Image (spheres, rainbow, N blue to C red):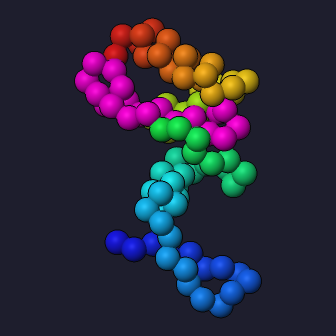
Amino acid sequence: MILLRRRWTEKQLQMLTFKESFAEVVEAQLKLPKDEKVAKEMKKLGKNKDITAVITSKFNLYIDGVKLDKYKDQASAEKAVKEFIKLLGA
């Protein structure tokens, strides 16, 4: 599958890099607001390796597609993911 993006200034289609296309697919799955981008995605968390966590560019934390909270920086969001999974016992 090749993803293409239309540039409004140009009338041509431009091929995306793998990283750009993967980021667009992840953001489409989560349905993030337009002004947020995925900063870090953590997959295979928990005992059963079935939990996915995403931290956005505005330090919002999403676990399995549900927004949990907003944090002041990425390190505190990562710490909250670990604490949340430990709390769930998952």
Q: Nearer the viewer, residue 79 or 90?
A: 79
Q: Is residue 79 left or right of residue 64?
A: right
Q: Nearer the viewer, residue 22 or 90?
A: 22
What's the residue at 37%, 30% (across, down)? 51
Tell me if I can see residue 25 in this picture.
no
**Residue 23 image position (x, y, % from top left):** 51, 54
Q: Is residue 45 magenta?
A: yes
**Residue 29 image position (x, y, % from top left):** 48, 51
Tell me if I can see residue 37 in this picture.
yes
The C terminus sits in image quarter? top left
Residue extending farthest bottom: 11
Residue extending farthest left: 48
Q: Quadrant of residue 13?
A: bottom right
Q: Quadrant of residue 3?
A: bottom left
The N terminus sits in image quarter? bottom left
What's the residue at 39%, 74% (across, down)? 2
Question: Against 53, is 30 above or below?
Answer: below
Q: Is residue 52 magenta?
A: yes
What's the residue at 55%, 80% (across, down)? 14
Q: Quadrant of residue 50?
A: top left
Which region of the structure is painted magenta? 42-60
**Residue 75 image position (x, y, % from top left):** 61, 22
Question: Against 57, is 18 above or below?
Answer: below
Q: Is residue 67 left or right of residue 8?
A: left
